Image (cartoon, grey):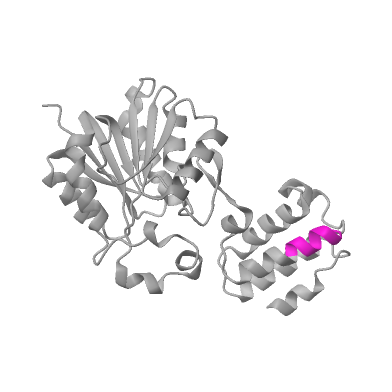
Amino acid sequence: MDALLDGLTPETSRRQAMRLLADAFAQAGIEDATIDARLLLCAAAGFDHVALIRDPDLPIEEEAAELALAMAKRRLAREPVSRILGQRSFWSFDLLVTPAVLDPRPDTETVVDGALEVLVERQGEALAVLDLGTGSGALLCALLDIFPQAQGLGVDLSKEACAVARENIARCELNQRGQVRQGSWDAGLPGPYDLVVSNPPYIESGALAGLDPEVRLHDPMLALDGGHDGLTAYRAIAALLPTLVAPGGFAILEVGQGQAQAVMDLLIGQGFTEVRAKPDLAGVERAVIGRKATV
């Protein structure tokens, strides 16, 4: 596969470079090989997708060839594109991503969609939002974006993750309404909150070794390991929700495939009503939503 990249020289055209990268990635069994090739080539050469289409026969030149080759070798070693580029698009933002945080996935936007569904009539209110295990701050940034009067707090055990979340809040120009606190989920949080969200670790400990290398080798284990049955974090969060969620407020938790019913049962056991699962775009039950009774 590396041999395919030998043809990547300063004289290689943009079209040829794109083909070389995509073929190498495809032979390595990388999904979305063409998309990854385009993203890395455009980043290495400093042009966008439009320029790639408009001028496909222009040479990529020396500096771009060297950088594209270096990036391609990292991708062939199964480092995710977002890690190579240092950012990930999520909702309407390009967020900083470092080894300290989980790489935000598009599936997590299901939580944001769910929040908009249940709180659409309160979209202009000064809601209080809490993101437990905020990581990169992706959920918090998206929620502050769709609720323009809301105040939000992100909590994470990792000092390094908190630094990334603060940087992303600042990048998104949300630092007047978003704060980050380092600590455990039950560390004297102010409240109550109109909306509590979380994308907690939910992979069963015994399944971690079988994860794709993009996840196993590059996402922090703290954000992945959900205990022996994948539900350890949900039990801890569910026990806190009656105190954290305001009457009439909502909890929305991302879940792994096949976990929705178990997490719904946990919320029901804590007295939440209107409990349901929300599917992602692939039809997988990806978020669990529950409302705290008003009485």
Residue 74 position in % (x across, y down) = 64, 67
**Dominant SS type (magenta):** helix
Residue 112 position in % (x across, y down) = 39, 39
Instruction: Residue at 44% x, 60% y: name it.
Output: 220
* Closer-to-camera residue (79/3): 79
Is-magenta flag for residue 61? yes
Q: Which quadrant does the C terminus fall into? A: top left
Residue 29 position in % (x across, y down) = 57, 74
* Closer-to-camera residue (57/248): 248
Is-magenta flag for residue 251? no
- Total of numbered circles in the picture? 0
Q: Which quadrant does the N terminus fall into? A: bottom right
Above or below, comparing residue 100 to residue 95 in the picture: below
* 191 relative to 87 in the view: left or right: left
* 263 relative to 53 in the view: left or right: left
* 207 relative to 17 in the view: left or right: left
Q: Which residues are magenta?
A: 60-68
Instruction: Residue at 75% x, 61% y: name it.
Output: 67
